[in-house]
Image (cartoon, grey):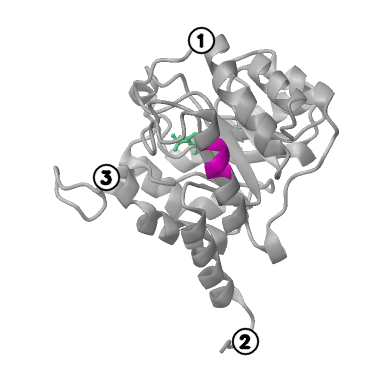
Amino acid sequence: MTRAVGLPTGRAGRPVVMGVVNVTPDSFSDGGAWFHPSDALEHGRALLAQGADVLDVGGESTRPGAERPSEAEELRRVLPVVEALAALGPVSVDTMRSAVAAAALDAGATLVNDVSGGLADPEMVPLVAEREVPLVVMHWRGHSTSMQSRAVYDDVVADVRRELAERVEAIEAAGVPRSRLVLDPGFGFAKTAAHNWEVLRRLGELVDLGLPVLVGTSRKGFLGRVGRAAGAERAPLERDVATAVTTAYAAGCGAWGVRVHDVVAAMDALDVADALMADGARE
Ligand code: PMM
């Protein structure tokens, strides 16, 4: 049984830096690099040393079009890594399956990051209520195989805001207090590049909902395409500078946290944001 703990906090009042540990063969951003548990463990250890406040361990790729692994396969990927990393620092489990979340919490995770915001598995919210752990509620409109056909909005920011607020109400009604919820607009999930830019530009409108907001732009496709001709996009591993810019911007908008692959770059970006926002001049 897990201990009830609050939300992770960032260093010295800064946004929380959530370092990504994908234990998948096919993630768009770093597919396969950390698929073996020992590699994932070393990677997580390095991210903590670089300053990550929490490690987000996931075993399912959510890139557009990805097929889901079986539950058994997801458990096999995630559990040994969660268990080993939880001994080193705070761990969140990135899963849409309540059984995987339950096993990860038993193995030492203290936060659930559900990209479906509890919609994919009806047992997820009751589990989070029972275990009294924080939950990241991401904006989601369907699994990866179909999500891009659902990227249709009247006003993407107003629609995401409304859909997230509806999730918060439903999740609260199911017994999870809002003090344990983090919202995430879901960059790249059922959104075109133009939608992602609009959400980022108007991030403050989501922060205004009054709940902590997590920003997951790291290495996403819209950062690969910006400023580049078709066919000359930045590859995922070449998007860390662009991600750092969005990290500093998110801090300026009042984001609670950023979910990133390159923690060194995020720490630099947050140093810059911190200096810019500090009262008075600095050396
Ligand atoms: N993006 C991915 C996976 N999990 N979780 C949250 N809360 N927000 C995100 O934007 C998000 C996520 C996909 O990116 P990855 O393949 O690099 O992990």
Give me the C-alpha separation between circle 1 and circle 3: 29 Å
Q: Position of residue 283 (x, y in %)?
A: 56, 89
When asked about the image quadrant of residue 204, the answer is bottom right
Q: 185 or 17, which is in the foreground?
A: 17
Give me the C-alpha separation between circle 1 and circle 2: 54 Å
In the image, taking residue 104 as reference, residue 221 lies left or right, namely: left
| Magenta-span inclusion, residue 41 | yes
> As displayed, is residue 178 above or below residue 247?
above
Answer yes or no: do the residues labelled 1 and 3 have beta carbons within 8 Å? no
State the residue at coordinates (78%, 41%). 179
When asked about the image quadrant of residue 91, the answer is top right
Nearer to us: label 2 or label 3: 3
In the image, taking residue 127 as reference, residue 162 lies left or right, namely: left
Label 3: state its secondary structure. loop
Label 2: state its secondary structure. loop
> As displayed, is residue 122 above or below residue 92?
above
Q: Residues within 10 Å of mark 1 (few under 14, many from 20)?
A: few
Residue 70: numbered disc: 1
Q: Residues within 10 Å of mark 3 (few under 14, many from 20)?
A: some
Nearer to us: label 1 or label 2: 1
Q: Is residue 136 visible?
A: no
Q: Position of residue 259 (x, y in %)?
A: 54, 46
Q: Quadrant of the N terminus?
A: top right
Residue on which disc 2 sits: 280
Earlier in the chain: of badge 1 and badge 3, it is 1
Label 1: state its secondary structure. loop
Magenta-tinted stretch? 40-44
Kindly report the secondary structure that dominates the magenta region of the rendered protein. helix
Q: Residues within 10 Å of mark 2 (few under 14, many from 20)?
A: few
